[in-house]
Amino acid sequence: MEIQGEFWPVLATTFGLFLLVGFLAQLIDGAVGMAYGVISSSVLLAFGVPPAQVSATIHAAECFTTGASGASHMIHRNIDWKLFWRLAPAGVVGGVIGAYLLTGFDATFIKAVVIAYLGILGIFMLARAMRGPREEPPHLKHVVPVGVVGGFLDASGGGGWGPIVTSTLLGRGHPPRYVIGSVNSAEFVVTVAISITFLWTMLTGRFVLEGGLAVGGAALGGLIVGGLIAAPLAGFVTKIAPARLLLAAAAVLVIGLSIWQGIQLWPRLLEYPVFREFVQQAALR
């Protein structure tokens, strides 16, 4: 495909924007063990990218960033393999189901659901940042259901593996070093499975890439390069900036973007009978 000369500035701007998004998101994610997908999804949705394409783009980029992160954790022996082998297969099952279902829903309706979901995750992240970890003996009970739910919501919402799985395990009292190492390493396996699912839906015609391959490729390239640049810096950021402060800042960003997008999307939602009837019933009360 030949790209016209005037189209190059658009590609350069797209690449630069998403390089910045990928850099900041990965920097925070590497320091606190969560938020890459949530931040990236919120920004992509704010720029009008359809929900399925948001999730597909982010997970394609995460194949590289989570691979680099997982390799680093393996080298530094931060992985609890018992925890890893419970999380990874469970996350794959949930992720594949979530990715397949996401490509079959109406874009406007699922965008409203995803925005609400990301807003709730933002509140959850903010609450997690404001309170300290609970003192509870570590255990491996219910890890598989947590992995399935985390994988499903991560694929269908464009993010959530870290906030759900990492926060749950840290809240139980597991050592942060092994939680973050195991969850990030398992995320690579889950992300690859989700990306393969999106690729299969594209090849079978169930999912159509909007905006063209050139713009989509520029956005993907920016996320990958930005994430790979930021990944080695996460350890340094952790030393100079409190993790709770970083997580709180990311949570405020996600909540703000969710509210802004919800206000913009509301008039279009009123075109759906179910939403219009809900508003009318609420007004009568």
Image (spheres, rainbow, N blue to C red):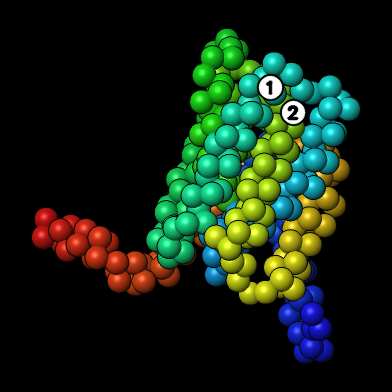
Label 1: which secondary element: helix
Q: Is residue 240 above or below residue 61?
A: above
Image position of 4 with respect to 232: above or below? below
- In this picture, residue 17 sits left or right of residue 231: left
Q: Which residue in the structure is indicated by mark 2?
A: 181
For the question of whether residue 64 can be seen, the reply is yes
Where disc 2 sits, the SS reads helix
Q: Position of residue 107 (x, y in %)?
A: 46, 64
Give the residue at x 76% y 41%: 66
Which numbered dot is residue 216? none
Q: Residue at x 83, y 50 (%)?
A: 228
- In the visual, does 152 lie left or right of 31? left
Residue appearing at x 21%, y 58% in the figure: 278
Quadrant assignment, res 30 = top right
Dot 1 or dot 2, earlier in sequence? 1
Q: CA distance from mark 1 to mark 2?
A: 13 Å
Determine whether, in the image, residue 49 is placed left or right of residue 57.
left
Disc 1 marks which residue? 85
Residue 59 appears in view: no
Name the spot of residue 91 as percent of width and height, x first.
60, 33
Q: Where is the C terminus found, in terms of image quarters? A: bottom left
Question: Residue visible at 80% across and 83% down?
Answer: 3
Left or right of residue 61, residue 152 in this image: left
Which-is-in-front pick, marks 1 and 2?
1
Percent position (x, y) of residue 102?
50, 53
Instruction: Look at label 2 and name its amino acid.
Output: Gly
Q: Amino acid at mark 1?
A: Trp
- Image height of 228 relative to 190, above or below: below
Within 10 Å of disc 1 (Cα), the crowding (few <14, some 14-19, many 20+) is: few
Residue furthest to the top: 137
- Residue 117 rendering spot, x and y as whole percentages: 46, 48
- Quarter of the image where one finds residue 22: bottom right
